[in-house]
Amino acid sequence: FPLPRIPVVWSSQGLSPAAYYERCGPWSLEDVLFLYRVLGPRAQALLIATASGARSLLQWCPELEEKVHVVPAPVLVPSTAPDVKPSQQDGVVRLLFVGLDPTLKGLPELLQAYVWLRRRHSHLRLEVVTRVSKRWQRLGGMEGSPNALGIRLHPPLPHERVFELMREADIFVSPTHADTYAIAAVEAMAHRCAIVISNFDPLPELFPNAEVGFLIAPGDVRGLIERLESLIANLDLLRRFQENARSRYLAVHDPVRIRRKLEEVFERVRADARRSWRC
């Protein structure tokens, strides 16, 4: 029996910087390019989550340009977000780190920055969600009890519990060395967290510098300290970034908006398929 003629739509991140593939897994940049060159021509549309990922892909595969549609990934979170953060009532500024690989996601740098900042700001707290050993303090050259420094370490948590931490947090910090979309940071924006994150593509597109937070170079502890200090010491700026973060989530990543974009692409693909079948 002949197979039904069903249009194929491929959704992906496009191409990430080569360093991402070198650090993050068994696939190389060449492997990913091979997949696009083999499977791309067979798809009627390619949904790429970021403009920077699409640009990188088209530099290597310009023949796919007519099929590429930039559609951000929909990020599902509870429909409500806190109007008031706990810090507005108790004065405690809360930082949040979420990342299963602590070294890859920049936890050592964050711990170094936090210990320095904590000496100046006793009202600072840090929540860490990660997979680490009992010697995790050594990651940041820490001495003494984490509890005495206002640090709480959590193992990997259910999504609902992570969302609870995001509702309480003021700043989501991710000085990561490799990432393609930083879904956790987008979820944090949905919960009115200001974002301090690394500055390589596609992150500047997702988290505009000085709009929802600050971008920093990976490994730059001094830069991380300066950016966090500017938010801790200027609560008006922090609140503005928090509101901007929530607004950007709703404008870019809200599933209702993404659904409309997807419907437009699917309708175009279906119309193109009908024309080709008639021919």
Image (cartoon, helix red, strand yellow):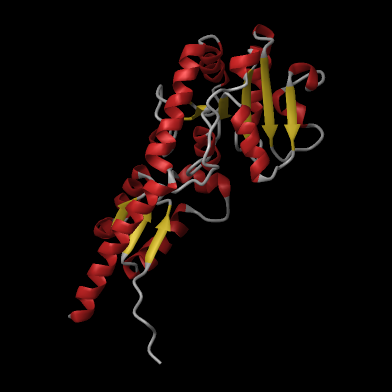
- Asked if one can make out residue 49 in the rendered structure from this viewpoint, the answer is no
Q: From the viewer's perspective, is residue 122 above or below residue 70?
A: above
Q: Residue 149: which quarter of the image?
A: top right
Give whichever of 55, 124 is nearer the camera: 124
In this image, 173 relative to 46: left or right? right
Residue at the image point whose x is 53% and y is 37% from the top? 80
Q: Residue furthest bottom?
A: 1
Q: Is residue 68 left or right of residue 72?
A: left
State the image coordinates of residue 124 (x, y, percent, origin top left). Answer: 66, 16
Image quarter where the N terminus lies is bottom left
For residue 220, above or below residue 29: above
Q: Position of residue 248 (x, y in %)?
A: 40, 33
Q: Say whether residue 147 is visible.
A: yes
- Residue 141 vertical position relative to residue 12 in the rendered view, above or below: above
Identify the residue at horizontal 75%, vertical 21% (top origin). Answer: 142
Residue 18 position, x and y percent, is: 45, 45
Say whether residue 113 is left or right of residue 35.
right
| Residue 210 percent across, percent down from the top left | 41, 21
Q: Which quadrant is home to the C terminus?
A: bottom left
